[in-house]
Amino acid sequence: MRRALAVSALALSACTALTGPDRVNPEVPSWFSHPSGDMSLMFRRSLTIEGRKVGEDYEQGRPEIDPEHARVFVGSSDRGLYALRAFDGSDLWRFETAGMVQSEPLYDADQDVVYFGSDDGAMYAVHADDGRLLWRYDTGTEIGKRPALRGDTLVFVNAADQIFAVDRTTGKTKWQARRTPALGMEIAGYAGPTIDGGSVFVAFSDGHVTSYALASGSEKWSVDLSAEAEQAHPNEVLRHMDVDTTPVVVSDAVGGGPLLVVASYDGGVYALDEGSGSRMWANTDARGVHALTHWHERAHAPHPKGPDRGGPIVPARDVVFAASSSTGLWALDPATGRKVWRIAIPEGGITAPVPVAGAIAIGTTHYGLFLLSPIDGRVIDGVNLESGFAMRPAAYGNRLYAMTNAGTLLGLGVDPPLGRR
């Protein structure tokens, strides 16, 4: 059931980073049989400057966490990127751009640099300690998706289906690629890049999914999912063929090579062989999907206080979550694409689900933020500040950060239920 959280302060040591007080290893599962674990409020911070807010009444993007130095980086519709202390949300610095910052920043721990896009069409690199500008790369069209980093190469896309690979230190171009955007009506949004091995995977508004060589930008393969979708729904006139989901890599899901999971808005969810682009499976019922998340539970012994205590080792488990504002939240078996479970959602949209402390957190545009069991989708807890959530939450260990559409940043602690009554 949805319920408002009471304000409670967590006692956090000022001399430790986020890893210090965590009681949960991010890779160790902790939920079972829908007990009474819950969320508690660390801080609530009004962030967006009301007089400077532009655009729609939504805050998009996602916070980025630097656990080593206990910092959170988050953009705002007031044109700024904020750096805040992770314990209490207090200010470290703010960087001003010429457009809304509705993006997913990326923190580079090796360089101590934050990369982020702006609606002014530029990708920025700023020093994480004080917000000083390192470089700015203008693309001409808004940048909202999280960039991908491998070695010294930073890859990012903009809303015009253009891909850029630059040197992470200087911002100088290494290579570029683009597809001609689809004609006609498209769903708002676009996919970000994914890097695995020596390849960059990008999806486009015309329904294509393409693999590029990271070093040179040369095309390795390209698959037209719009044709796949038309074959899967021969009796329908499909209007929205966009592939707006950032590709998700699932390793060894079928005992072979890695899978690349993507979603066509009208066509469904598809798994492609990472090396060749060949289709491995399709779930054409999961339609309207705008975001994908891979959840992994590693093999482990039963918890000594759980219902299966003393039993055999619990095998590893993988689930791909597909978020759709029209057909609900889907949990799919990444080996076959079959539905594990599906839950309907209330009126409005939902964010991509985020793994946290063995559970998943998901925001809704009208009804608050919820903590769900990844095993069966049942609600564990929720918080509702009346303004809703469009920004994807961010998590590390048992810490969760989420920004409301009213520009209020929440810092939450997720308390696992094991050992509690």
Image (tube, helix red, strand yellow):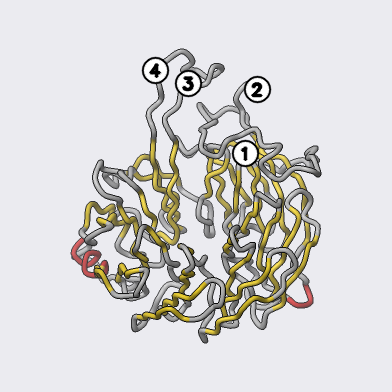
Amino acid at dot 3:
Pro
Instruction: Categorize mark 1 by other alpha carbons within 10 Å: few (<14), some (14-19), many (20+).
Output: many
What's the CA distance linking mark 4 and mark 2?
A: 23 Å
Place residue 137 in its image quadrant.
Answer: bottom right
Query: Nearer the viewer's eye, disc 1 or disc 2?
Result: 2
Residue at figure coordinates x 64%, y 57% from the top left: 388
Instruction: Categorize mark 4 by other alpha carbons within 10 Å: few (<14), some (14-19), many (20+).
Output: few
Say whether disc 1 or disc 3 marks the residue closer to the N-terminus.
Answer: 3
Say whether disc 4 or disc 2 marks the residue closer to the N-terminus.
Answer: 4
Q: Do the residues labelled 4 and 2 touch (CB within 8 Å)?
A: no
Q: Do the residues labelled 1 and 2 touch (CB within 8 Å)?
A: no
Give the number of marks.
Answer: 4
Residue at figure coordinates x 52%, y 56% from the top left: 350
Residue labelled with disc 2? 420
Q: Which mark is residue 312?
A: 4
Amino acid at dot 4:
Pro
Residue 259: image location, x then y, percent: 30, 52
Residue labelled with disc 1? 381
Q: Are marks 3 and 4 in contact (CB under 8 Å)?
A: yes
Label 3 secondary element = loop
Label 1 secondary element = strand
What's the CA distance linking mark 3 and mark 4?
A: 7 Å
Say whether disc 3 or disc 2 marks the residue closer to the N-terminus.
Answer: 3
What's the CA distance linking mark 4 and mark 1?
A: 30 Å
